[in-house]
Amino acid sequence: MLDIFDTMNISASGMTAQRFRLDVISNNIANAETTRGENGEPYRRKTVVFSEVLRDALGKSQYNSIEDLNGVEVSRVAEDMRPFKMVYDPSHPDADGEGYVKMPNVNVMREMVDLIGAQRAYEANVSSINATKAFANAALRIGRG
Amino acid sequence: MAGGVDPINNINSLDPIKRIQKLNREKTEKAGEAAGKTEPDFQKVLDQAIQEVNSQRKASTQARNDFAAGKISNIHDVIITAEKAGISLRMTMEIRNKIVDSYKEIMRMQL
């Protein structure tokens, strides 16, 4: 059994992870039209990879008992390797000889859906915290009245 | 013997009672010492609990200050710390109420 505050910490880690996801999605949306990114290429869409935190006191990543549950963490930010969109726009400074511009592989519609997903996941963690709090408050009401 | 009650014997007759009282006192003192060794002092337990609640409150204030100073980027961390402090405080209040209730109950006891 975990301490009731550890349960809250797990939810807090979930909220932090979703906040980070929000940052990455916002960055994708902000750079949806960026044609000059790293090494001259357009911006590449980024995604977040989450991993479960299972750690004992020694920092060993191994699941032994329920006490090892520590929530979620962002393990890395991965790049979407799908090809860039080719858009015909000869007036663009980054257009090639045939008038095509390499645009980022960001689909704003998809990012919006991800955004809603992140928002709902954050809210789910809030619900989890509220449930934890309700548990604690119910326990404190024992023997009253 | 003339005079009826022998004053010396009269005083001596109280001695066994005194001795028993003395024995009893020693016994209770020893029992008290033994209890003190095996169980943690009630006052210490309460003190520790209150210290913990106090540290939670301090952490909450610290989180709020850090957030105001721009050191914390997550709002939920501040709120969760405050919630934790609130729950600890409620817990302490409940326990205090129980202790005060017990005390009052004992004080109302008819002797």
Image (tube, rainbow, N blue to C red):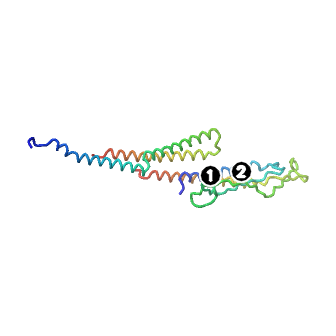
**Percent position of residue A65, x then y:** 57, 60
- On the rendered image, what quadrant is the N terminus of chain B found in? top left
Q: CA distance from mark 2 to mark 1?
A: 17 Å
**Residue that numbered label 2 is attached to:** A24
Q: For residue A13, which numbered disc appears in the image?
A: 1
Left or right: B62 in relation to B103: right
**Percent position of residue B34, x then y:** 39, 50
What amino acid is found at the position of numbered circle 2 in the picture? Val
Q: Residue at x 60, y 51 (%)?
A: A12
Marks 2/1 same chain: yes
**Percent position of residue B39, x then y:** 42, 51
What amino acid is found at the position of numbered circle 1 in the picture? Ser
Secondary structure type for disc 2: helix
Q: What chain is tagged by disc 2?
A: A
Left or right: B44 in relation to A78: left
Q: For the view shown, which residue lies furthest in the right direction?
A: A97
Q: Nearer the viewer, residue A38 or A122?
A: A38
Q: Is residue B52 above or below residue A52?
A: above
Q: Nearer the viewer, residue B61 or A90?
A: B61
Q: Residue at x 50, y 52 (%)?
A: A136
**Percent position of residue A109, x then y:** 73, 54
The reply to whether callout 2 and callout 1 are in contact (CB within 8 Å) is no
Locate residue A63: give its quadrant. bottom right
Q: For the view shown, which residue lies furthest in the left direction?
A: B2
Secondary structure type for disc 1: helix
Q: Residue at x 8, y 42 (%)?
A: B2
Q: How many C-alpha atoms fall within 10 Å of the one at disc 2: few (<14), some, or many (≥20)?
A: some
